[in-house]
Image (cartoon, rainbow, N blue to C red):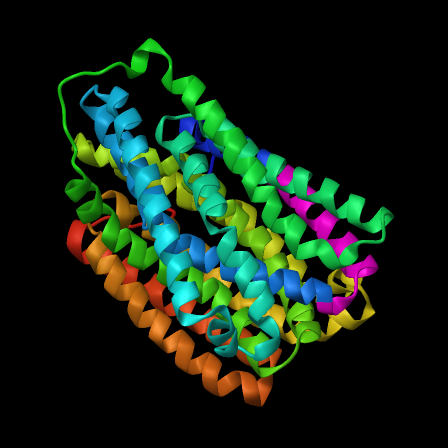
Amino acid sequence: MRLNKSSIIDFFKSSLVNKSIKVLFIRISGVILFFGLTLFLTNTFDPSLVGQYDFSRSLLIFLGALSVFGMHQSVIYYGGYLASIDNLWYIKKIYYKMVWMILLITALVYFASLLLKIESIGALFNTSLSATVEKTVLALFFYGLTMFNIDVFRGIKKIYLSEIHRNIIRYALFFIGILILYFTNNESYLVDVFLLNFAILALLSTMILLFIFSDKEYENGVIEISYKDIIKRSAPMAVSAASFLLMQSLDILMLANFTNYELVAYYGSAVKLTMIIALVLASVNSVITPQIAELFASEKMEKLRDSIKKGTRLIFIITFPMILILGAIPSFILGFFGENYISAKNALWILLAGQVINSLCGSVGVYLNMTGKQRPFQRILVSALILNIVLNYFLIPEFGMSGAAIATSTSMILWNIIAVIYVYRKDKIKVYLTFK
């Protein structure tokens, strides 16, 4: 690739890069809002309450991955596939089927928790967590439906609407709730407000989707995708999503078990900072995911290669300066959360190392899921998850926050590298960073 003025202009004028940058600006606004509320929490709420919130958030992310059963990914695949055969209208029927499946799964999780007794689930971590676990399980359907709806927006090519819900509305509503708690001296209801937020979001996003589906574009045609088809497509994605999200949250869950809420809060600040790096990758993925599904289904491989190449380069261009800044002045940045939060400096450095490889490997996970390779991706992530569990179990008692960070970064590096090698051997496509 010749780095002249013309090629740079063409690069930034491309549809993928242009949309990705717009999505990134929306996500940056969301990050500013998220860090605003996080800084407010860490500087005004008791660390044990912040840690309780971080624990509930991590548990909800993992259980949410189970509740949507990979359908948040498969609905994007179906959106791309149906668009390639001019049958996007059928996404409406798929949506209704998937919502019923989410309701059934979350009901099963709830009744399973009753059968096992909430206290027993909490005891897997420690006895003081059972109340938080109970509240989180009760909110599971609303969380699952919210996150599913957000990806349905992506599947029907309403990318900006999806990102506004994901990054602006859900944080804005929660921030308002936090402010109400603070000024009414009801800080102890922090987790309750966090979970109630998703009930409001689920209702709002569902109403918007039903309005969109009332358009004539979504009237019936001649095609049928059964529940069996959906399960067959979604199940491997569900395992992959659960494994991936558990790797992202397992460090906090196990840290809560081996230590206390205060350390969870300190470590959580480092995790939140690395979200800035992951933000760029997620922004590009929001745009490129339906494109990969549609281009691969249409067998337009050259266009597919070009889209992936541009996406990976954009990720590198934006993330590299961010990583350098966070790595150069970690104490200064962590200090904004509060003086005690600087203790997460070493953990932040370790987590950044994992994000470097994550960024260089581009949209490899998305590529595997959108091109019918969800089962190999499932095996890769499950292997990395097992390693993650083992490392967390042995390293956290010995090294605390740094041990949790080592486990997370090691598993992230492993699955990214293996996935990149698999894609290149299978399809001769370079999803990793190249300048040729």
Residue located 14% across and 28% down the image: 224
The N terminus sits in image quarter: top left
The C terminus sits in image quarter: top left
Position of residue 120 measured from the top left corner of the image (x, y, whole percent): 47, 76
Does residue 51 sit above or below 407 in this rendering?
above
Residue 23 appears in the rendering: no
Nearest the eye: 229 or 340: 229
Locate residue 422: give its quadrant. Answer: bottom left
Does 36 lie within the magenta span? yes
Position of residue 198 measured from the top left corner of the image (x, y, whole percent): 56, 43
Residue located 48% across and 78% down the image: 124
Nearest the eye: 121 or 433: 121
Does residue 111 sit above or below 351 in this rendering?
above
Locate residue 169: give its quadrant. Answer: top right
Residue 343 appears left or right of 423: right
Does residue 146 sit above or below 185 in this rendering?
above
> Among all residues in the image, which is located at the extreme bottom?
398
Position of residue 248 measured from the top left corner of the image (x, y, whole percent): 48, 63
Picture mark count: 0
Label the magenta part by its dominant secondary structure: helix
Residue 249 appears left or right of 267: left
Nearest the eye: 59 or 241: 59
Residue 394 appears in the rendering: yes
Span of residues in magenta: 27-48
Locate residue 220: give its quadrant. Answer: top left
Residue located 38% across and 51% down the image: 107
Does 243 lie within the magenta span? no
Nearest the eye: 288 or 315: 288
Residue 300 appears left or right of 432: left
Position of residue 28 measured from the top left corner of the image (x, y, whole percent): 62, 40
Residue located 21% across and 42% down the image: 230
